[in-house]
Amino acid sequence: MTTTTKPAAPVAAAAPARRPGSASLALRQGRMEIRQFLRSRESVVFTLGFPIIMVLIFASIFDGDLGNGVSYTQYFITGMIATGLMTVSFQNLGIWIPIERDRGVLKRYRGTPMPKWVWFAGKVIMVLVTGVVMTALLLGVSVALFDLDLPSTATAWLTFGWVSALGITACTLCGIAISSLARTARSGSAVVTPIALVLQFISGVFFVFTNLPTWMQQVAAIFPLKWMCQGLRAVFLPESFGANEPGGSFELTRVALVLGAWCVIGLVLCLTTFRWTTRRDG
């Protein structure tokens, strides 16, 4: 008796793995950056807590009337929103990128087949998410404790959106660019923090901008933070208060032009100065 065996069925070739698309790569990198940020409790507390702590301190101490139905608290809160956006972008990136560079993280990343732009996209996503959370917390505290009036028109919310978007974009690009000035991980904070503090003092955050010396106003007008503060005042303060601005109005067109110009300047600086390795690595 003979037995016959059926030929084995041909094994189907495994389908090639589907490569993730550009959006998927960027989102994955963004999630990783957010997780890394949340693991650093010091960064979370400083980034999200600093603007809120400053509002609680200054708004509780100073409660004068600036005219046109505007209190110092309202004026100060608009500046702290702008400062918070600068902190999560310019200051955070300017400090943490040198740390990653010094530890060799950027050097190893450059050696992977992952497109370089994905790393930058992850940083941008982390900044945007952190900025939204920080702004929401700051507005919540200000409305609950200091009677801040939220924008009541769609136009005001639109202004709030584009001022915040242009401002955080400019600060993000400048933060990436200035990270190349730090020679070591430890020097990142020493390079960035003084610049951020000086800009806050001369840009109308802690003091009414028009009360500052003229030369100080002129220096502040070169940089984005002054224009972010001015644009946000147009959102949260009465239109009549614009007469107290140096230009006699909130000058939203000029705000858009200056912030847009800084986005271009920041991008050029990033493309020409960014380094993946430390100076000693060449």
Image (cartoon, rainbow, N blue to C red):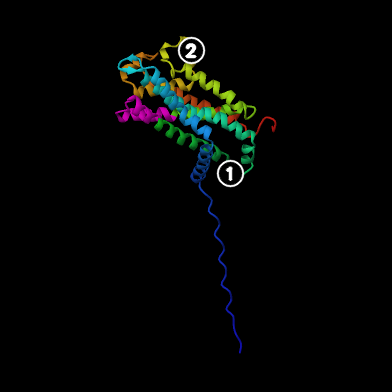
Q: Which residue type does callout 1 highlight?
A: Met
Picture coordinates of residue 182, whole percent (x, y): 62, 26
Question: Mark on residue 151?
Answer: none
Q: Which residues are magenta?
A: 138-165
Mark-to-mark CA distance, 1 and 2: 45 Å
Question: Is residue 3 left or right of 245 when viewed as pictured?
Answer: right
Residue for point 61% across, 28% down: 180
Residue for point 54% across, 51% down: 19
Question: Is residue 120 left or right of 205 when viewed as pictured?
Answer: right
Residue lying at the far bottom in this picture: please name it.
1
Question: Is residue 164 left or right of 278 when viewed as pictured?
Answer: left
Question: Is residue 222 left or right of 116 when viewed as pictured?
Answer: left
- Give the residue pinned by disc 1: 114
Q: State whether the magenta stretch is mostly helix, strand or loop.
A: helix
Q: Which residue type does callout 2 highlight?
A: Met
Q: Closest to the observer: 187 or 4?
A: 187
Residue 159 part of the magenta-drawn span: yes
- Give the residue pinned by disc 2: 216
